[in-house]
Amino acid sequence: MDVSGGSGQPRSGNDEPTEPPTGPAAPTPHDSTARPKPPAQQPAATDHDEHPADRPGLPDRSGESTPDPSPDPDRPPHPDSASGPGADPHTFAPGADAQTHGPGADANAPHGAPHDTHPDRALATSARGHGQPPPPPRRPREPGGGLLMGRPFGVPVYVAPSWFLVAALITWVFGGQLDRVLPQLGAARYLVSLFFAVAFYGSVLVHELAHTVAALRFKLPVRRIQLQFLGGVSEIEKEAETPGREFVLAFVGPLLSLVLSGVFYLALQPVERGTVPGVLLASLMISNLIVAAFNLLPGLPLDGGRMLRAVVWKITGRPMSGTVAAAWVGRALAVSVLIGLPLLSQSGALGTTAEDSVGMGTVTDALLAAIVAAIIWTGAGNSLRMARLREHLPELRARTLTRRAVPVETTTSLAEALRRANAAGARALVIVDGHGEPLSLVRESAIVGVPEHRRPWVAASALAQDLTDGMRVSAELAGEPLLDVLRATPATEYLVVEETGEIYGVLSAADVERAFVKAMARPS
């Protein structure tokens, strides 16, 4: 069972469904959409001749101590602010959207906290006073999910807490069965049963490693492998580029389970049946055969559903059509499991006796059927949602989401910078040197924290975040490549540049997030 598309993607197998995606951080397929030619860029005002002495009414306050204009991270958005796609494009009024975590925001920072990658940089003015610099960004945490067991092929393998619950359940149930087959074991049968539970999930790990190796072979990054309740999951962060690769990626898991079943069958031949090794080998052979057969069922989120999706994708030429077909088959499969599993148990088709098919056994079978059906139904629904996400991702284009910016020099006051931005119909500020080279971006959230009467005495550069290489975004980026850049360098604003290096504008992570949510809300 594997997860194509990363964290938040539907899981393909007898495992727990992942949580729905939260924001555009979810990975997506390659963007192959042809990008239109860039529109004509409007000229931006320059500030090369600006000097504090040229501004009337600005007395020299270099010797005064000024309050720290940096915004409090816990401060709520300004009630009168208006920014984002719905704001007046002719008024630069920074506000609430700068407090929102977008795909480039630091997930470990407090809500609304500015992200400054250079907290110790020297400021161009004393307007910041003696305030504390913002803390350095925290490194993104490695994906967790339980107890780390190792890193085969460089991919972390975790055992989720739910595994210990199902391992205890397997130990108890299988131990009861061993009591009938090998009554001479006594209490030691539970040790044998625990060994079976561990060996069975070792087989599940091999199944997941098959998906992982295939994904790495196709240059698809794998976030992690997790063993959990009712199976495992390989979280693959990107979708296969072709239906053929999608089919292979899904098929290798059940294939390895079938191979393991054959290996256990061959190992069973020289072993006496009524012994502990014989019972263990026979049980592992049957369990791997069941895992392979179950995952080959043609419905998402199972591997067979992904294989069906690949076939429909190949026939229709549209991955979305394949997803819709496989997801609805998966939902029909969930209903079949919910109704059919208890009926098979009561009829004795699963090896139960008349005494086992009543009372507590019936309740257990119904509960198990409900859990499996819920996992399949939820996974199918998640597959449809993620397909919609992938379909709309190419609509996220840096060029169309970028705010027009006004370049100002380091000595320009915040009031003057905002006046020029409003006059030019711009909604972002870029600090440049005397040659027009960009140095930093004025943080919109920091502007909110400066009262209007203080803005003539505060330099715009005091509220700026130094530019790093990762904060320079090409205007041609769109879809998944754009989100990859934002995730690689968390920030609230990014400088958007043309291929020639000219300033195109400033991209707000909050704008990307709003566009993402809006695209997801539209029907496919």
Image (spheres, rainbow, N blue to C red):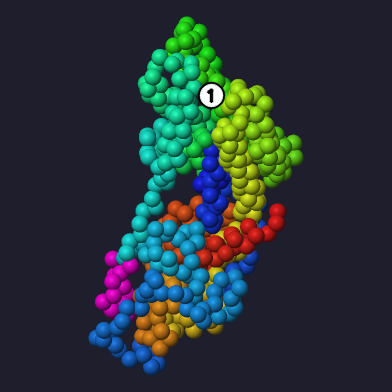
| Image quarter in which the N terminus is found | top right
Residue 369, x across and y down, in percent: 61, 37
Q: Report the residue that reaches farthest toward the bottom.
A: 57
In which quadrant will I find the C terminus?
bottom right
Residue drawn 58% across the image and 33% down it: 359
- Locate residue 146 relative to residue 181 in the image: left or right: left
Q: Nearer the viewer, residue 125 or 432?
A: 125
Q: Is any part of residue 452 visible from this angle?
A: yes
Q: Is the residue 299 above or below the residue 470 in the image? A: above
Specify whether residue 275 is painted magenta.
Answer: no
Query: Where in the figure is residue 382, as x and y percent of width and height?
Result: 61, 47
Question: Label 1 is placed on what type of residue?
Answer: Ser
SS of the residue at dot 1? helix
Q: Position of residue 356 (x, y in %)?
A: 58, 27
Q: Please report the bounds of the magenta region as a residue range.
A: 120-134
Residue designated by label 1? 287
Instruction: Bin the neighbour count of mark 1 within 10 Å (Cα to Cα): few under 14, some 14-19, many 20 and up.
Output: some
Q: Residue at x 56, y 51 (%)?
A: 20
